[in-house]
Image: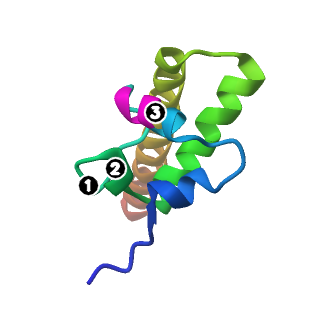
């Protein structure tokens, strides 16, 4: 059994300002993805997905973005994070290489 925390659609709706419609739109535009369930009421999400939905809602409220723009911004944020991690790994490898070279 996995140690990943799963959150139901109902539990997400219990959070402030989140409706089933918001969850449906976020899934429809690829902002979040359910890990299980065929119907909206059966959807389960990871804690990371729930946090991403809250981040998306802040973007929508603060910047008045539509779901297409939110999906793009989140995708770019994830890409940026991946590139930063890769850059850090490459810098560490370079440091090891340079220190072995001396």
Q: Residue at x 66, y 24 (%)?
A: 60
Residue bearing mark 1: 37
Q: Quadrant of the C terminus?
A: bottom left
Residue 73 position within the rendered picture, expressed as x and y whole percent measured from the top left: 53, 24
The kind of secondary structure element at disc 2 is loop
Q: Which mark is residue 69?
A: none
Left or right of residue 47: residue 101: left
Q: Please state which of residues 78 and 1 is positioned toward the viewer in this rendering.
A: 1
Residue bearing mark 3: 26
* Residue 31: quadrant of the picture: top left
Q: Which mark is residue 34?
A: 2
Residue 69 position within the rendered picture, expressed as x and y whole percent measured from the top left: 52, 16
Colour option used: rainbow
Q: Residue at x 54, y 61 (%)?
A: 11
> Do the residues under discs 2 and 1 have CB atoms within 8 angstroms?
yes
Residue 66 position within the rendered picture, expressed as x and y whole percent measured from the top left: 57, 15
Which residue is most to the left? 38
34 to 44, vertically: above or below: above
Q: Residue at x 42, y 41 (%)?
A: 32
Give the Cα separation between the discs numbered 1 and 3. Answer: 15 Å
Mark whose residue sits in front, 2 or 1: 1
Residue 48 located within the stretch drawn in magenta: no
| Magenta-drawn segment | 24-28
11 to 79, vertically: above or below: below
Which of the marked residues, 1 or 3, is nearer the chain's N terminus?
Answer: 3
Left or right of residue 79: residue 18: right
């Amino acid at each position: 059994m996995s140690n990943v925390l799963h959150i139901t659609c109902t539990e997400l709706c219990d959070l402030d300002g989140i409706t089933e419609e918001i969850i449906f739109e976020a899934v429809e535009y690829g902002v979040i993805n359910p890990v299980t369930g065929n119907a909206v009421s059966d959807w389960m999400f990871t804690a990371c997905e729930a946090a991403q939905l809250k981040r998306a809602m802040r973007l929508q409220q603060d910047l008045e973005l539509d779901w297409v723009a939110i999906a793009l911004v989140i995708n770019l944020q994830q890409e940026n994070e991946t590139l930063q991690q890769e850059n850090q790994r490459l810098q560490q490898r370079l440091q090891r290489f340079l220190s072995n070279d001396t």
